[in-house]
Amino acid sequence: MNTISNVSNQVMWNRLISVVEEQAQALVRTAFSTSVREAGDLSAGVYDTEGRMLAQAVTGTPGHVNAMADAVAHFIRRIGRENILEGDVYITNDPWEGTGHLHDITVVSPSFLNAELVGFFGCTAHIVDIGGRGFGADANSVYEEGLYIPIMKFANQGVVDKTLVNIVRGNVREPDQLVGDIYALATCNEIGHRRLIDMMQEFGLSQLDGIAEFILENSRRATIEKIAALPQKSATGEMTIDGYSHPVDLRVKLFIEKDHMLCDFEGTSGLDKKGINVPLVYTKAYACYALKCAVAPEIPNNAASLEPFRIVAPENSIVNALHPAPVALRHVIGHMIPDTVYAALDKLLPATVPAEGAGCLCNFQVSVRPRTDEPAPEGTVRSEVLTFNSGGAGARPQYDGLNATAFPSGVMTMPVEATENVGPVLIWRKELRPDSGGAGQFRGGLGQYMEVGVVEGHEFDFQAMFDRVDHPARGRQGGHNGGSTTIAQDDGTAMKGKGKQFVPHGRKVMLAFPGGAGYGDPKQRDPDMVKRDLARGYISASVAKQDYGLSDAEIQSVEDAVQRGENI
């Protein structure tokens, strides 16, 4: 047997990362849901025959990819090795064995070379509708949240299970869209498989065992070396967030040991009655992501580079929800976990982690229907429109926070045109929100304003999925808090930050998304940066004066320069 050099192994490792990135891009190009095509709410990865993740696509979210690191082993166990056949495609949306809620479809396909199993490809996508109450926090158990698909065969040796397809079509509001997404998921796995076989034939491989051990051994060693260089101490972090009907306390104790880091969420709030609970797999995904970003960001994600970051939480706490807890909006809590972990890590590694940001995505879903207060005109329709939006990211130790940028999810803000194209929704306003970024030596990222309505002749239910209404992002090292979320109808009618709410014909929803918090004392900010922010409209004259100490004369000078069209 020929010995493969380290150089060849490194080339193949890089090739695998390219393979799964092509796999992910194929999903983006072929998916029906705008959440996949426009927001990139997906993941893709390749696994060895034991179900260990070897490489993940750069395109994708930590919640999907890091959760999927555990998923393929569940597929192997449920399907049974003796039933894994060439041409098979497996499927599930199990929140506890997939990626945390029913709205994520996970598809896994085995890869065979010369009739021998050599590995698996897996991918996940967020789909707009899975039936039930719809995407929101209003359910009282997972049974109300939509159709459950256990781990099973979508295709058996290339033959699609039409009975399953008919069941899916009969239980969702957008059947063509969902079935199209499932086929897109299966197809992207097939593309990954083809590229893998090309690579194996190019390098003369009959199986992936050797490259798998090279990847996993080197990744684990490199990660442990990073951890071993840190002070072996512990610290606590905590955060209070809005919750559904009452605030939620997130608490963590972080331990840095010689060969691993441990997050223990003892003391965190218990289960909520509504669907904001988080399965442990999703908590692990975002807690691991937070630690890896801070400690070992340059090491590619795989089973071995994630393993030294260990997560525990009490059963039936809000971050370790057991079946049948409602979990549809697990991201609202899950996206707050990194900032909670960073509250502890900041005490151990100063000047390393950012201030708090908006945290969870500023998602909403609009269920449009013909008006019911009087006869609707011809041409009115029913439609489900989901849009992903972002508040501001927290300022970093040496840089301002990013405006309207999702951290930690990395999900992209969806273009207005794409949202309006899939249903009779109108986005009347979408722009950055001045003064929403917390003041600091480094300023927090700005949130956004949005005004949302529907085409004449329609009314709608607005499914809100927001946080930071009562608990804005907190500044770090003297930085100020970010702006809070606000939501109301255009006639002043108050609305809740979470839950399905009726909006009558002719009304709009007025939204202000939260800003990221500042880092460091605002008085230490470079005056030229303050003037630049004022000139760009990121801050008002009053904030420039009160928070940053700019004089009236300096403010007037900036305003005069803007009037003259000068760059600042």
Image (tube, grey):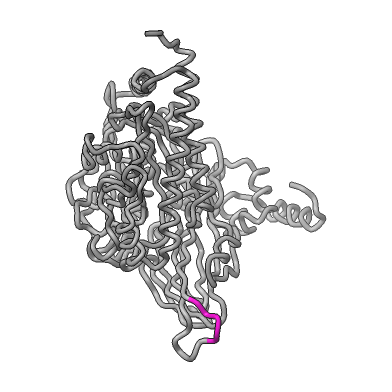
* Residue 153, position as x, y percentages in the image: 29, 47
Q: Nearer the viewer, residue 155 or 511?
A: 155
Q: In this view, does 114 lie above or below 286?
A: above
Q: Which residue is drawn at 50% across and 83% down?
A: 505
Is residue 379 part of the magenta span, yes or no? yes
Horizontal arrangement in the rendering, residue 331 relative to residue 529 (left or right): left
Q: Which of 562 and 449 is in front in this view?
A: 449
Any part of residue 564 in sight? yes
Q: Is residue 303 above or below residue 243?
A: above
Is residue 228 part of the magenta span, yes or no? no
Any part of residue 273 in sight? no
What is the total number of numbered labels drawn onto the structure image?
A: 0
Q: Residue furthest right?
A: 564
* Residue 3, position as x, y percentages in the image: 40, 8
Name the dominant secondary structure of the magenta segment: loop
* Residue 127, position as x, y percentages in the image: 41, 56
Q: Which residue is drawn at 17% across and 47% down?
A: 315
Q: Is residue 195 above or below residue 270?
A: above
Highlighted magenta segment, given as a residue range: 377-381
Q: Quadrant of residue 289?
A: top left
* Residue 368, position as x, y percentages in the image: 46, 74
Q: Quadrant of residue 421?
A: bottom right
